[in-house]
Image (spheres, grey):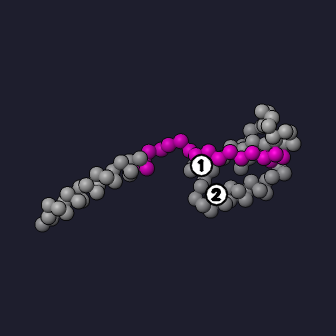
């Protein structure tokens, strides 16, 4: 037979953990990493591939657990509002 004190502890622990479990299961907005390159996607292909590989090793998957947005200056002034979006992966 379960004692009253053990039962109350069990119910209280479950009630405290419930909101955390419910929040973890809800799909949310992906975290976004902004990647700003001064040159062209081709010039930085090796570096961006290594960046994505390291994220994978850490458990971050582009499009699944994190979104990566690339912008390339292509030799223009980095302060230029004309930086081009790219879907380089």
- Establish if 22 lies above or below 77: below
Q: Is residue 81 left or right of residue 16?
A: right
Question: So how many labels did they put on this image?
Answer: 2
Q: Is residue 70 left or right of residue 16?
A: right
- Establish if 34 lies above or below 81: below
Quadrant where the N terminus sits is: bottom left
- Say which residue appears at 23% left-offset and 59% top-offset: 9
**Mark before the other along the chain sequence, 1 or 2:** 2
Q: In this rendering, does residue 39 appear at all?
A: yes
Q: Are marks 1 and 2 in contact (CB under 8 Å)?
A: yes
Please tell me in which quadrant of the rendered image residue 17 appears: bottom left
> Which stretch did the figure color magenta?
24-41
Q: Is residue 12 left or right of residue 40?
A: left
Query: Which residue reaches farthest top?
Result: 81
- Given residues 32 and 63, the one toward you in this image is 32
Please tell me in which quadrant of the rendered image residue 71 appears: top right
Q: Is residue 53 left or right of residue 28?
A: right
**What secondary structure is found at the residue carrying circle 2?**
helix
Q: Label 1: how many residues lie within 10 Å, few (<14), some (14-19) or many (20+)?
A: some
Q: Which residue is mark 2?
A: 55
- Say which residue appears at 71% left-offset and 47% top-offset: 35
Image x and y of residue 45, in percent: 79, 53
Query: Which residue reaches farthest front?
Result: 79
Image x and y of residue 70, in percent: 72, 44
Q: In this rendering, does residue 63 appear at all?
A: no
Please tell me in which quadrant of the rendered image residue 8 appears: bottom left
Query: Which residue reaches farthest bottom?
Result: 1
Residue 59 magenta-drawn?
no
- Say which residue appears at 83% left-offset and 50% top-offset: 42
Q: What numbered label is drawn on residue 66? A: 1
Image x and y of residue 31, in percent: 58, 46
Image x and y of residue 62, in percent: 63, 50
């Amino acid at each position: 037979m379960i004692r009253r004190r053990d039962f109350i502890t069990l119910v209280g622990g479950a009630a405290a953990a419930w909101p955390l479990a419910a929040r973890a299961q809800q799909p949310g907005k992906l975290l976004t990493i902004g990647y700003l390159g001064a040159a062209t996607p081709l010039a930085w292909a090796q570096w961006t591939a290594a960046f994505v590989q390291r994220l994978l090793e850490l458990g971050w998957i582009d499009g699944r657990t994190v979104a990566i947005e690339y912008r390339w200056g292509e030799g223009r002034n980095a302060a230029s509002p004309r930086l081009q979006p790219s879907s380089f992966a």
